[in-house]
Amino acid sequence: MRNITLTAAAALVLPGFAMAQDAVQIDGSSTVYPVSEAFAEEFQIATGNRVVVGVSGTGGGFKKFCRGETSFSGASRPIKTSEAELCAENGIEFIEMPLAMDALAVIANPENTWATCMTVEELKKAYEPEAQGKINNWSQLNPEFPDHGLTLFGAGTDSGTYDYFTFAIVGEEGASRGDFTATEDDNITIQGVSTDVDAIGFLGLAYLEENRSRVKAVEISYQGGDCVAPTVEAAGDGSYQPLTRPLFIYANKAHLDEKPEVLAYAKFMFDPEHAQELVSETGYLALPKEAFVLAEEKIDARKTGSFFDGGSKIGVSVADLLAAN
Amino acid sequence: MSVTTQGSLGNAAVKTDQAAYAAIARAKRRDIIFSVGGLVVMAIAMTLLLTLIGDLVVRGLGRIDYDFLTNFPSRKAERAGILSAWVGSLLVMLVTALLAIPIGVAAGLYLEEYARKGWLANLIEINVANLAGVPSIIYGLLAVGMFVYGMNLGKTVLVAGMTLALLILPIVIVSTREAVRAIPKIIKEGAYGLGADQWQVMWNYILPAARPGILTGAIVGLSRAIGETAPIITIGALTFIAFLPPAPITGEFPFINFDWLNAPFTVLPIQMFNWVSRPQADFHTNAAATGVVLMALTLSLNGVAIWIRYRLRKGSRN
């Protein structure tokens, strides 16, 4: 046994070990993770302060955040009333800061000739709870669609993507049929749709952008409006509805006051000089410079609470988010 | 043995020589059919395994270089590395091995040699066997409730090691018992006959004779533990961590430092899982490369154990 210990221990004496020290703790949504990763990496290079990022999902992240374990929590939807109450119970005050816009895309097989544009009603018919076991043919969604079997893919029920999609399309968060292929890994959705002519699925825009050659985007018509394709631009100008959503960072107010490194990280994250560039690099639409200036002021003023009254809103534009700051 | 064989052949020869030859031919044919069948099954299993490994290696091997092993994670796939992940995996495995092997072996020996056989022993035996089949996430949930919040140990290397030790404990216990049971009774009885007490028998005869079996069980257990993701994620392992735990060996007295036990960490399977679920294909290549490293690490851990087993076996014969 001693042999094993010594061999393993000897192998571990490498340059790069440093003394233990408090690190800035971040957790939350897997959608926001790439952004947090980018900021954490650059912050550590710039200041030498340590940052660690976990991925527990939006809900799991808020649980830790409201216990006071983390200083920041990434979220792909606004904080829910129940979560805000949990925070209040534990005496945690938070500052809500929108960081970027993301879009959900509905995708189809490139050889699918009929589903170039779908209305929100058609999508609702396909995914709502009542569809379970009944809606299994394209012609049931729209008589003009061919008599083809319908295969559905989508994000898993633990993801913020699923929460927002059901909220925006079905009308109630978390309400959907249970018999579609739900996966926590959006690459599975890409794979499924790219090999089945009759399949559609929904996922984050970044996954569509990386796989344009394997799947095509379905345009969305909302409330009788024009068909709009999911693009970063359409998400930015608010024309791609209702599947555009803001991404947030929530900060623990007490930690900002007590821990200088937490405050430094918050300032770094919303520094208008480089924040936009870092967010854009990760494939999301960064809010305009103005938003970061306002967020900085919000941090300085320690303005707490949520603008969203405990739920997602459809059609939140960049201007609304500026107002929120 | 030879006497009976000759006898039965002799009986057959009394009837007719032909019948005897036919019986032998039938038996040989059955042998051939069985060995061909076995070969086919093995070929299928190996082809599947090698295809999977080959696919991983083809995708990932080109990505592995010195930088990949010594860089921290990054948002840029080509700059990202797995230093914090493989160091984390090694440290967690160290804790797991140091906890699970002594406790598991002691428990196995106790159950097999000391415990009185009765309904209680049976109950424990059934429970241990059942524990080996419990999904790993359950151990994660137990650990998050008991170690992380109950005992307030935090999300550290120590807690991860303890969780995985719980997970593989049944495997170590069961294999220890199997190994002890396989030792011929003559050895034990001979030792007792020469006047050894129970501890002497245990320490000088049972344990050395059971060591190959015990080590095999430990290897199987550790190989399972190193690939586990679910319980480690449950207890709150990180995904992005760009620094290493403090070194276990320091330049100053007392040279050994236990701060690393309380350090935050990540492990290889988590890093791999994160990269697989990213949209960019470059990250998928990184994930495959991480898989190759994980496999190499598992193989080398096994290699170390086999080498120790070999050394011990030589030692016990002298």
Image (spheres, coloured by chain):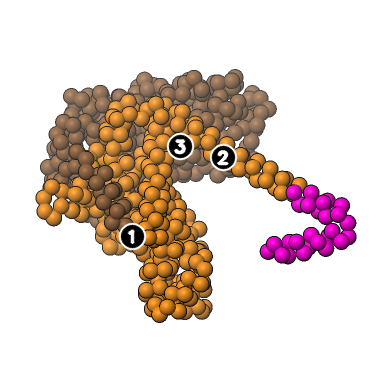
Chain colours: A brown, B orange
Residue type for callout 1? Leu
Numbered label attached to residue A185 = 3
Q: Which residue is mark 1?
A: B99
Q: Main secondary structure of the magenta part?
A: helix
Q: Is residue A95 above or below residue B214?
A: above
Give me the residue at 59% from left, 20% from top.
A111
Residue type for callout 2? Met
Q: Is residue B86 above or below residue A315?
A: below
Give how far across and how far down residue B126 sits, in percent.
Answer: 52, 68
Residue A206 on the magenta span: no
Mark pair 3, 2: CA separation: 29 Å
Q: Is residue B214 above or below residue A245?
A: below
Numbered label attached to residue B46 = 2
Dot 1, crowdedness within 10 Å: few (<14), some or many (≥20)? some
Lower sequence index among marks 1 and 2:
2
Numbered label attached to residue B202 = none
Give how far across and how far down residue B14 sits, in percent.
Answer: 87, 61
Give me the residue at 28% from left, 48% from top.
A7
Whether the residues at callouts 3 and 1 have beta carbons within 8 Å, the answer is: no
Q: Secondary structure at mark 2?
A: helix
Q: In the rendered image, which quarter is residue B165 located in?
A: bottom left
Specify the subunit that label 3 lies on: A
Residue type for callout 3? Asp
Q: Which residues are magenta?
A: B1-28
- In the rendered image, residues at marks 1 and 2 fall on the same chain: yes
Specify the subunit that label 1 lies on: B
Residue B14 on the magenta span: yes
- In the rendered image, residues at marks 3 and 1 fall on the same chain: no
Q: In the rendered image, which quarter is residue B150 located in?
A: bottom left
